[in-house]
């Protein structure tokens, strides 16, 4: 159970196992005992247990996955609270105390039809889209976590899980299940504990992608205080050393459908319309100064700034050091100062600064600017005639 809170978030390195407590006939492990009350969300995350036509569920999956998801919900909620967004987390459809309503879906094809590579996740997502169209009452939001049992073949099995999709894909994300995928192993210095850090940390990270989060890296000062960013290398530290959500990640979650407590709000409709003017990026001593103005038909909730080394392709942004500033208006000015010392993990001569404007409906718009440390030149928008 928790031995302390580190700046209002879980210090995962200090977790141990315990016997658990009983709640309405359901045994709840002690790691879930110290819960905070989370605000009720208008929408919930769809959780699907996806079985190939030739596959049976891993025993006791409903209990194990429910406890893992409830713990993860608390982690996200505490991080949102720490960053000033209130006790909000991704909503879960609760079937009974301690149990999440997990949709058990039997696929049209054998498990081998849905591999990690060769579009396995896309095939599963297309099939689930058909399922939700035929069963609209089962779809609780536009965000879906798909969990598949590990393959059992010459390469993969309970001691070496794998074979199935394990990544984010739009608002879908994929993770796996195996017999020892159990919260009781969290933080243990055992084979089961090491596996749990890898696959539970991976689930937490891929779920972040399914909740609209890109990769990002902690600043130098946050790394010293809080540990490793979940959406950076946190999938390798979750459960063994302090892991956290950055301000930039929480700013995006603030505009995520399954974090919203407003029933009538619509998400992800239309195009992200933001007019950005008078953008200026200058370099003064050890500081980067960013300023400009914005205007949009809807509220611009926040500005995220990412600074990273090349390459800039998909899955090459783990090093993107992130910063965030709340805006909260349809129009106004923005300004941000970044200390170069916060970028101590970046070593390339070339670097890119990306501005991400986050809208109230969950969409965002980005602008990118490339610079070279050995030939720094300030940037300023050309005046429009």
Image (cartoon, rainbow, N blue to C red):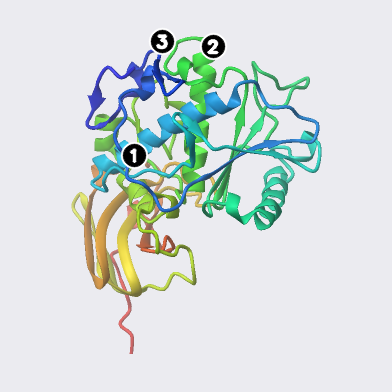
Q: Are marks 3 and 1 in contact (CB under 8 Å)?
A: no
| Residue 94 to residue 21: above or below | below
Question: Is mark 3 in CB contact (under 8 Å) with mark 2?
Answer: no
Q: CA distance from mark 3 to mark 1?
A: 24 Å
Q: Is residue 26 visible?
A: yes
| Residue at 48% in and 71% down | 271
Q: Which mark is residue 77?
A: 1
- Residue at x 40% of width, y 14% of height: 20
Q: Tell which tag, 2 or 1, sits nearer the viewer.
A: 1
Does residue 13 appear to the left or right of 103 in the view shown? left
**x and y percent of residue 287 in the render?**
21, 52
**Location of mark 3 (residue):** 19
Q: Quadrant of the C terminus?
A: bottom left
Reading the chain from its start, which is encountered first: label 3 or label 2?
3
For the N terminus, give its image quadrant: top left
Q: Residue under label 2, please give it.
A: 191
Q: Label 2 neighbourhood size at 10 Å, few (<14), some (14-19), many (20+)? A: few
Sequence-wise, the earlier of marks 2 and 1 is: 1
Crowd class of label 3 (few under 14; some 14 to 19; many from 20; radius 10 Å): few
């Amino acid at each position: 159970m928790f031995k302390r809170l580190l700046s209002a978030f879980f210090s995962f390195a200090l977790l141990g196992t315990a016997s658990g407590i009983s709640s309405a006939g359901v045994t709840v492990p002690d790691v879930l005992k110290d819960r905070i009350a989370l605000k009720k969300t208008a929408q919930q995350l769809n959780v699907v247990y996806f079985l190939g036509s030739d596959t049976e569920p891993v025993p006791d999956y409903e209990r194990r996955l429910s406890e893992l998801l409830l713990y993860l919900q608390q982690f996200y909620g505490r991080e949102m609270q720490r960053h000033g967004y209130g006790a909000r987390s991704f909503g879960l459809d609760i079937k009974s105390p301690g149990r999440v309503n997990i949709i058990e879906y039997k696929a049209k094809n054998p498990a081998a039809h849905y591999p990690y590579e060769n579009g396995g996740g896309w095939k599963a997502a297309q099939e689930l889209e058909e399922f939700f169209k035929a069963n609209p009452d089962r779809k609780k939001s536009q965000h879906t976590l798909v969990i598949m049992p590990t393959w059992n073949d010459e390469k993969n099995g309970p001691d070496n899980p794998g074979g199935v999709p394990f990544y984010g894909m739009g608002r879908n994300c994929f993770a796996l299940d195996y017999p020892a995928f159990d919260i009781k192993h969290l933080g243990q210095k055992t084979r089961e504990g090491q596996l749990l850090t890898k696959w539970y940390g991976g689930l937490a990270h891929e779920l972040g992608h399914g909740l609209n989060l890109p990769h990002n890296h902690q600043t130098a000062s946050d790394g010293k205080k809080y540990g490793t960013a979940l959406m950076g290398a946190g999938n390798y530290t979750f459960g063994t050393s302090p892991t956290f959500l950055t301000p930039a990640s929480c700013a995006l979650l603030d505009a995520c459908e399954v974090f919203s407590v407003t029933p009538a709000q619509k998400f992800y409709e239309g195009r992200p319309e933001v007019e950005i003017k008078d953008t200026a990026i200058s370099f003064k001593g050890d500081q980067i100064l960013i300023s400009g103005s914005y205007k949009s038909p809807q509220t611009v909730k926040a500005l995220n700034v990412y600074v990273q080394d090349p390459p800039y392709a998909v899955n090459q942004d783990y090093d993107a050091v992130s910063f965030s500033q709340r805006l909260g208006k349809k129009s106004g000015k923005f300004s941000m100062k970044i200390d170069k010392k916060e970028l101590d993990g970046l070593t390339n001569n070339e670097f890119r600064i990306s501005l991400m404007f986050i809208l109230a409906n969950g969409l965002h718009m980005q602008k990118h600017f490339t610079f070279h440390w050995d030939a720094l030149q300030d940037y300023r928008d050309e005046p429009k005639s």
